[in-house]
Image (spheres, rainbow, N blue to C red):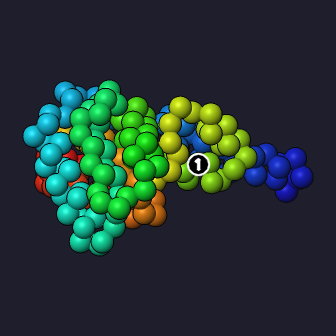
Amino acid sequence: MSICRSLLMMIGILFVPIGIVSLRAAEPVPYGAPIDLVTAKKVMAAAEAEAKKNSWSVVIAIVDGGGHLVILERLDNTQWGSVEIAQRKALTAAKFRRPTRFWEERIAKGGVDLKLLKINGFPMEGGLPIIHQGKVIGAIGVSGVTSTQDAQIGRAGIAALGNRSS
């Protein structure tokens, strides 16, 4: 086999998968009606129970789909700085309709993704969108322990909605 033919075969093998794999990003989850206070309190109660079960002092913020604060709790002995961080995590999750961990992971890769530090958001795990019937109705942000533990508390809050949320 000639070198030229071998080279063309290799190029063909390398580029065939590009035609198969979609280069488009997944469509974002659309926004829905904003979370109401009754639902926000239900999410808050479950998140608070998870934090207390683990003896974690945290701030929990719940915002509507537009990022407007609906309810905020600062558990006893939680550092003051967590008030702002919890709100920013919730706002970021609502604005971008995805968990804040997405941004943390991209920035951790470095390189070109470092430009994401310029987004007006908080790129650290602990902010999660609240999805109801396939639409973002709000978000929860937690701060006070490790970012993984913050996210655990947020997931527990969202889980209180049962199959109403995903």
| Rendered view: 46 above or below 114 | below
> Can the viewer see residue 93?
no
Q: Amino acid at mark 1?
A: Arg
Position above or below: 24 against 78: above
Badge 1: how crowded within 10 Å, few (<14), some, or many (20+)?
some
**Residue drawn at point x = 67 percent, y = 37 percent:** 115
Give the residue displayed 27% in from the left and 43% down from the top. Answer: 72
Quarter of the rendering containing residue 144: bottom left
Residue 31 location (% of width, % of height): 28, 29
Q: Residue at x 87, y 47 (%)?
A: 4
The residue indicated by pointer 1 is 106
In the rendering, at what x and y percent does residue 53 appear?
Answer: 23, 71
In which image quadrant can residue 134 be found? Answer: top left
**Quadrant for the N terminus in the image:** bottom right
Residue 66 spot, x, y in % from top left: 32, 27
Viewer-nearest residue: 121 or 32: 121
Taking the view exactly as shown, the residue that stands out farthest to the left is 38
Query: Is residue 164 visible in the rendered structure shown here?
Result: yes
- How far from the left and from the top, in percent, is residue 17? 59, 47
Q: Nearer the viewer, residue 109 or 54?
A: 54
- At a point 39% along the width and 36% down the height, the residue shown is 91
Which residue, as the protein is rendered here, is positioned at the far bottom?
54
Query: Helix, strand, or loop for circle 1?
Result: helix
Q: Quadrant of residue 48?
A: bottom left
Is 163 on the left-hand or right-hand side of 75? left
Q: Nearer the viewer, residue 23 or 11?
A: 23
Q: Is residue 106 left or right of residue 128?
A: right
Is 22 on the left or on the right of 110, as rendered?
A: left
